[in-house]
Amino acid sequence: MHCPLPHISSSSATAVSASASASFDLKPAKRRGSYNCGRCGLPKKGHVCQVSPDGTTTSASTPTSTPAAAITQTSSSAARPPNPHSARQSYSHLRRALDFDDIDIRHDSPELDIGVYDNPLPGRDPDPDSEIVSGGLLVRCLWEILRRLPPAGLMAAGCVCKGWRETTKRLWRAAEELRLLVPPKAQLRFIGSVLQKCPSLTRLSLKMKSDVDATMLACIAFSCPKLESMEISTSDAAVNRITGDELGRFVADKCCLVSLKMEGCSNLGSYVLSSSSLSTLWLSDLYSLSKTVLNCPNLKEISLEFSRQENDITDLITLVDGMGRSCPRLQNIHIASIRLSHAVVLSLTAANLRGLRMLSLVLGSEITDASVAAIASSYSGLELLDLSGSSITDSGIGMICNVFQNTLSSLLLALCPNITSSGIQFATAQLPLLELMDCGMTICDLDSQNSPSEESDNQPPNTLKSKLHLMYQKLIIKHSRLKKLSLWGCSGLEALCLSCPELNDLNLNSCKNLHPEKLLLQCPSLQNVHASGCEELLIGAIKSQVSDGLASVENHFPCKRLADGSKRVQAPSCLSQQSDDGDDDKKRRRMVGRQSCNVLLD
């Protein structure tokens, strides 16, 4: 039951105020707000102060029978010293949250992640473990809690008290990285109000659901003087209206900019980018570039993705030639365009980029085995090669294996219809360092839409027999270092046998003709198997083999006979006889402690 608290009269309140004032003169000032009245020390909630600002007791304006005046906290709470700034706060209208708390966010609250310094008191060196804010919470604990809040929660935390408000302001000032989802209703005003709170911001990532224009770019340039990395991604409904001239001015003005990634660049038209600090450049959705100039001597990574439109007039030969001459330190190149051709590859090989390690030329249907030969003769130290969507054959794979045998660790050949299972098996056998291989949509059922019986009348028997042989192929892979294998969309794959002890991710999505009785998975490290679009029997066979493989390695300890020889028991690991080969012990322990495999159907 609720017990009534003792009544405090006006004379008692005056005495409490006098004792509180005396204690205030003796004790040092606190760095937090107070929930008690600055005149009499009583709780502020439901309180009408009877003490005037000069310290004298006023006439009782509230009857003693009023619950707000009659029921208060205990005398120990009332005896707390008042905040030295509370009298000043009572006459001013200070904001109790951040300056942008008037922005209506509601249900479309932007998603925000903050990366800040580890020091909760930037610019000062006090002991954060000894400083306490209101509620008895240490500053470091409050710092770690607030840095994980979304913007709505962070603004609400600033309304709690002065100590929390100061901590939130410190957090914004110390923020180094900001990842923000901008809804359509909170456009430039929201971004400007957030960025002006982060003077130390160096990495910015924006997911735009509204249009992007030059005003947005100017706001970022003005609010983030120390910006080193910027990423702007757009949703399907958003439009990027930034032109090439505006982007060029932004890059030229930001002397510290190291990384620039931007989506939806269909309105650039042309660009002239000059920067001595820029090392990473990603531009996507490019279309019909009339002029491309890159003057970035320290550029190491470039990614250019063009829209898949037949009327694109971009001159890729001139683009690649200028890129090779003005960016001699390039290490990673990715170009995705349907206009890629053998002539573009020759222009790239003529650039003689000595440090090139990763080359990705995607969707170039005119890239052939001759292009592979040119790449192999100029860049023999590649670690990643992506020729997805090209027209190379098994002969091109043979050239890749001969040249990059000691360097290549990632090979991506998706959407290459001229590659067969024999070429894939040869690549895995000849590339010992291979860790990732993507062969999606290579072993395809070419006659999935038209059955063989419909074309049997128009084609000779030998051609029909060859097509049937290519339609249903077998794939056997045995590799000691392969970790990821993708066979998505290989509808022409009939049998699959994998013996890969390090394989942890296998993609079999849409392998519709793969027979369950012709599937063999000897992959003890397998963690994820993607089987979306497969037959139910195949999914059941995958789950069965994965679970059997896990059960075969569980409790895999040797048995040992007791001293008297009476019976055999299962010996624990501490009593098991150590093997002479240390690698076998490590593999056994890793197999016993591994997690179960997940069969993903989404």
Image: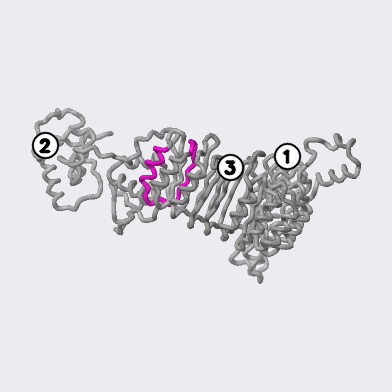
Which residue type carries mark 3?
Asp
Judge from the rendering whether residue 499 lies leftward or rightward of residue 469; answer left or right: left
Task: Say what secondary structure mark 2 lies in.
Answer: loop
Residue 199 part of the magenta segment: yes
Q: Earlier in the sequence, mark 2 or mark 3?
A: 2
| Amino acid type, mark 2 | Ser
Within 10 angstroms of label 3, few (less than 14), some, or many (20 or more) residues? some
Instruction: Please give the range of residues in magenta.
Output: 188-212
Query: How many marks on residues?
Result: 3
Looking at the picture, tell me which residue is in the foreground, 81 or 302.
302
Q: Is residue 343 toward the left or the right of residue 61 in the image?
A: right
State the residue in front, 475 or 281: 281
- Which mark, by number, is residue 494? none
- Whether residue 273 is visible to the viewer of this picture, yes or no, is yes
Compared with residue 563, is residue 510 higher up or lower down, i.e. above or below? above
Q: Position of residue 476 (x, y in %)?
A: 77, 54
Q: Which residue is mark 2?
A: 52
Amino acid at circle 1: Glu
Earlier sequence position, callout 3 versus callout 1 = 3
Between 185 and 572, the one lying in front of the other is 185
Q: Which mark is residue 285?
A: 3
The quadrant in which the C terminus is found is top right
Mark 1, residue position: 535
Q: Residue at x 59, y 58 (%)?
A: 325
| Front residue of this view, candidates 437 and 510 | 437
